[in-house]
Amino acid sequence: MHILTEWRSWQMDTGQALKAFRTAKHIKMTDIADNVVSQSLLSRVERGETDISLNRFNHLLQQLQVTPTEYFAAVNSAAPAADPEDCYLGYFPQFLLDTETVQNKTRLTARLTVAQSLAAQTKAEYTSHPSQWRLITWRAAELFVNRITAHLDPTQVVPVDSTPAQSYLLNLEHWSLMDVILFSYFADQFTPTIKLRLLQALLHHIPNIGLVQSWASLLTDIVFGLFQQFMVAHQLGQAQTTLTIMNDLERRFNQTDDAILLLFMRGWLAYIQDKTDQANGQQQMDDAISILSILKYPQAAKKYRQLANRITGIDSTPIVGDITFNR
């Protein structure tokens, strides 16, 4: 009887956790039910009335864009060996545009063909089975096409409606890694007010310490990317707020990289704000770069030296907010 009670409890925990993730993202059962997990089976699983096979459970996590690490942390259980996280992030790992590709027109043209194919595929999936997430994925694919096109022929870039992604993020009751990635991907499409509102909402949902490492570098990318966007637009009030948020993250994660980046950000803001003493701001940026060199991070030191040269006008190349998939 004791074994049966424990088994029943496991069923309830599994169902409740899956339902919690689904409802927090405002995902309807009909949006994720398919030929692998029917709506009736999903309903019974969520009520704790039936078991679910490992394959179907894994499929559900992929449909919900929830990684196994996040799921098992939510139910206070150790995560078993699982597929790479990319398997649980939909099409987004395919929307990466790296620096090497951007600098090579042949590779960029080939990437555009892939992007256009992804846009057509995601459109077809949304058309055949409309849902909020499929619409967001389609819009993301269109944005991917735009980001490549902007490097090849900016005159061919067309507007992409980011409203579905914005509405989804604003209504979240719980953030998963996929949602953080979604925010980073669409951030440059949002207004300054929406960017800060979403960033502050996100910071209230940073998961327990067991998951922090999978979020830390991504959060740093987002905050610094937004800071760059605000600085380029001369929105110094929003930049100051973002700097304060970065300071909070540095205290929370206690990572050396964040402390160095914070020093660079302070220097940049000081350089722009205080025209009578720009040397002070420039010195802080130089100090951050020197620390990176001393710690033997040559690539990072090179990256921030290039950025500092753009800030001070030595290099006239425009500065672009660099967040994760928009490199």
Image: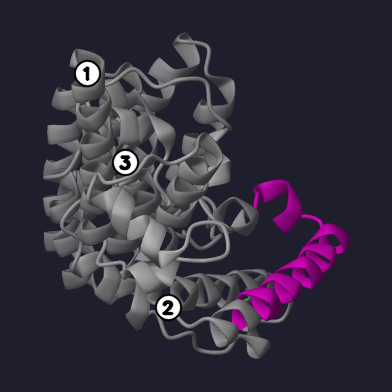
SS label for mark 3: helix
x, y percentage for residue 204? 11, 45
First in sequence, mark 3 or 2: give its number. Answer: 2
Q: Nearer the viewer, mark 1 or mark 2?
A: 2
The residue singled out by tag 3 in the image is 219
x, y percentage for residue 170? 20, 68
x, y percentage for residue 199? 20, 54
Q: What's the mark number on residue 254?
A: 1
Q: Residue at x 18, y 14 (%)?
A: 2
Q: Residue at x 25, y 23 (%)?
A: 4
Disc 3 from disc 1: Cα separation:
13 Å
Residue in front for this viewpoint, 165 or 263 = 165
Q: Is residue 72 above or below residue 59?
A: above
First in sequence, mark 3 or 1: give its number. Answer: 3
The residue singled out by tag 2 in the image is 131
SS label for mark 1: loop
x, y percentage for residue 104? 81, 56
Q: Amino acid at mark 3?
A: Leu
SS label for mark 2: loop
Residue in front for this viewpoint, 253 or 280 = 253
How many numbered marks, from 0 up? 3
Q: Which residues are magenta?
A: 97-123
Determine if residue 209 is in view. no
Q: Amino acid at mark 1?
A: Asn
